[in-house]
Amino acid sequence: MMKRLSMLAAFFAFASGAALAAYPERPVTLIVPFAAGGPTDVVARIVGDHMSRTLGQQIVVENVTGAGGTTGTTRAAQAAPDGYTIMMGHMGTHGAAPAVYPNLKYDPLKDFAPIGLAAGTPILIVARKDLPPKDLKEFVAYAKQNSDKLNEAHAGVGSVSFTTCSLLNSILGIKPTRVPYQGTGPALNDLVGGQVDYMCDQIVNLTPQIQAASIKAYGIGTEKRSPALPDVPTTKEGGLPEFQVSAWNALFAPKGTPKEIVIQLNAALVKALDDQATRKRLLDLGAEIADKSGRTPEALEKLVSSEIARWNKVLKVAAK
Ligand code: MLT
């Protein structure tokens, strides 16, 4: 009996080892929970492009939009944990969402296996190019006087743009009309077109439009200016030091994905972030790339847990 059991155990170990050794044997779906062309989509496609080459299989981006990114994130949480569905989450889906959705259908910590951090994304306050204020000081005064006339674009409740502008609006004590989109890709099109007045967004979405002067940038919420946009002052320089905020994008697999597969996906991500051409594409857009110790699944797990605590506090104050 014992002998038969140990033969069976050996067989299953061999079978699962063989399956893992073959991974991936078909394309991997990468869920982006926002519209195509926006920051999450852009980072996913840049990183996914290089990871596809490492893995020898296509990484196919699927945009599953809705509810500030929580629809796609729920889909990813409930996908088969076999390594063939992963997602690009961010500070909103895995940090802020629990604070604004009491009935959220996933737990960012319990329902996901973190793979690794893909990019740090500083946040900027931007406006349509013909909004009267010339700089951040003028914007603050203008926004306070015209709060009820202003339209602010965001990517849905719980998204990065929503949460960071909730912080901005609460600092300024203003209540603009908040206009939701399926992502800040389409929101940016309307900002360029002048249909909305301002938004808070991740740098990777904004750099080309700021460089082309199709929109105005009032300030970046980081300690230092970004090398990608050296002319944009920090919010501290602009007189609004309370608005210190950054976001991030990271890869997650559904909880239960075999550890060996998570390690393989993390190694492909790390390799992408070390690749000169991939780095340049990200850095040119203003993304920040973590050093090696910041790219591990463990580092991402810690980040998610500290972000949940941070945004829970910030959004409670902002909702008052
Ligand atoms: C956000 O505001 O959460 C993002 O900009 C979403 C996106 O990728 O469009």
Image: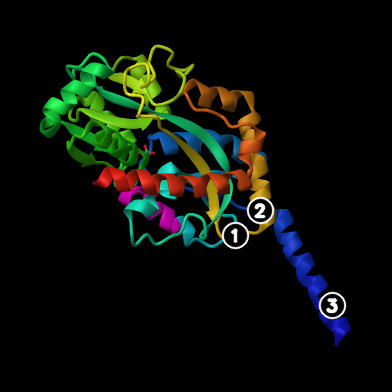
Three-letter code, disc 2: Ile
> Residue tagged by mark 2?
261
Q: Are marks 2 and 1 in contact (CB under 8 Å)?
A: yes
| Other-residue count near label 1 (Cα within 10 Å), few / some / many at <14 / 14–19 / ≥20 | some
> Residue tagged by mark 1?
82
Q: Nearer the viewer, residue 71 or 292?
A: 292
Residue 33 seen in the current view: no
Helix, strand or loop status at disc 3 = helix
Q: How is the structure coloured here?
A: rainbow
First in sequence: mark 2 or mark 1? 1
Q: Left or right? Give the position of 287 relative to 234.
A: right
Q: Position of residue 146 (x, y in %)?
A: 12, 27
Please tell me in which quadrant of the rendered image residue 145 appears.
Answer: top left
Q: Left or right? Give the position of 143 relative to 249.
A: left
Type of secondary structure dominating the magenta stretch: helix
Furthest toward the top, the residue is 231
Helix, strand or loop status at disc 2 = helix
Mark pair 1, 3: CA separation: 26 Å
Mark pair 2, 1: CA separation: 8 Å
Mark pair 3, 2: CA separation: 25 Å
Q: Left or right? Give the position of 215 relative to 299.
A: left
Q: Which residues are magenta?
A: 64-75
Q: Is residue 213 above or below residue 246?
A: above
First in sequence: mark 3 or mark 2? 3
